[in-house]
Amino acid sequence: MKHANKARMVIACLTAALLPVTGLAAAEAQSVAGRPGGAGNPGEIVSAEPSAFRLPPGIPTATAAWKIHYRSTGAGGKADIVSGTVIVPLDGRDGVRPLLTYAFGTVGMGDQCAPSAKLADGSSFEAVVLNGALERGWAVVVTDYQGLGTPGDHTYMIGRAEGAAVLDAARAAQRLPEARRAGVDATSPVAVMGYSQGGQASGWAAELARSYAPELRVKGVVSGGVPADLLRFASSSTDSNLALSLMTAIGHDAGYPELDLDSYLNDDGRALVESMRNGCVVENALAAEGKSIDELTVRNPLEAPDWRRRLGDNRLGERAAAAPVYVYHGTNDTIVPYAIGEQLRADWCARGGVVQWRSIPMADHHTAYLFGVSPALDWLAARFAGSPTRGNCA
């Protein structure tokens, strides 16, 4: 029971089988697979192959899906290749279709944990949210983020890399021939959505979109349960959140090798970190259970200026969002403190953004996600419909 409760706590951080491709679609898919991504610009497709989108526990859906690899920009501005999944509903709809680029919450560090793998076999609980968007007639693209499903360590919680991966996923979906035949193209209105880690990623996409991907027609962004200030988040973390802290350390060490995480760890810490590099979120939570940061380190990275600077670089709210944003947070969130969400709302409002803030009374990290999803989708639908919003900053 103790392990089950621990697993549920960490999962709270996350917060029709594919029809065969035949004829022209098959030829297009094969022509894309293995082809270099044009001039190497962000969003260019490197490869694509048929995949599937299933609901738990593996229920087929009336959709078509493709696993893609596309070019993006990683930590420190380095070019990178990221994987993801493009999904379109088989609803016979004509004309341009809205596109939702969705950022997953924490799934872990191993490639087997990547959203694309979970969506294909029906083991992702966030698939229900995607299905809600697909039932509205929207296309959906999901990024696996850097190093999750591709070589190297996942750059977990590096916001700039996550935001770029989210925006470049939308660019890639607009370039995929099969998605274009289903109504997704450069004129498609775009929305961004995510919770927890995904909320950080969607928030960074909102801040980066104007300069990084100005051609995308971003109509609205949803960010829930956002760890907007990693320094504050890490300082407030308890031993029960140790797995998240260690995954954040692994991610930053992957993105910024000069941080030299290994030099801060003792033998027990090195063994635990090495196992976590390949684990999914529940496995990592159980592996870290009962341990403390003091038992695993010879010195605390949070006291080192270079670590504090890199974590501080990922603070949201220092730039205006490029589109209206819907921000929600549970008042009883013990994973990402409620005050961090309040501060993000205040920061974006202070910069003149259109912010719709929703506080969910008595909700913890997990229940806020559950209660917040449907209203968030409704809010995005209104943005796609062209309805104006003033937000509630005042």
Image (cartoon, rainbow, N blue to C red):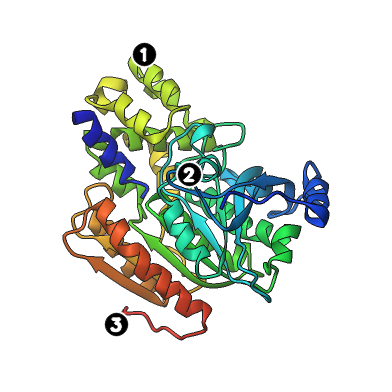
Q: Earlier in the sequence, mark 3 or mark 1?
A: 1
Q: Earlier in the sequence, mark 2 or mark 1?
A: 2
Disc 2 marks which residue? 58
Q: Earlier in the sequence, mark 2 or mark 3?
A: 2
Q: CA distance from mark 3 to mark 1?
A: 52 Å
> Tag 2, which secondary structure?
loop
- Dot 3 amino acid type: Ala
Disc 3 marks which residue? 394
The 10 Å Cα crowd at callout 1, few under 14, some 14 to 19, many 20 or more, is: few
* C-beta proximity under 8 Å, tags 2 and 1: no
Q: Would you say 374 lies left or right of 213 here? A: left
Residue 226 placement (x, y as % from top left): 35, 56
Disc 1 marks which residue? 267
Picture quadrant where residue 111 is located = top right
* C-beta proximity under 8 Å, tags 3 and 1: no
Residue 38 placement (x, y as % from top left): 81, 52
Q: Front-most of 372 and 273?
A: 372
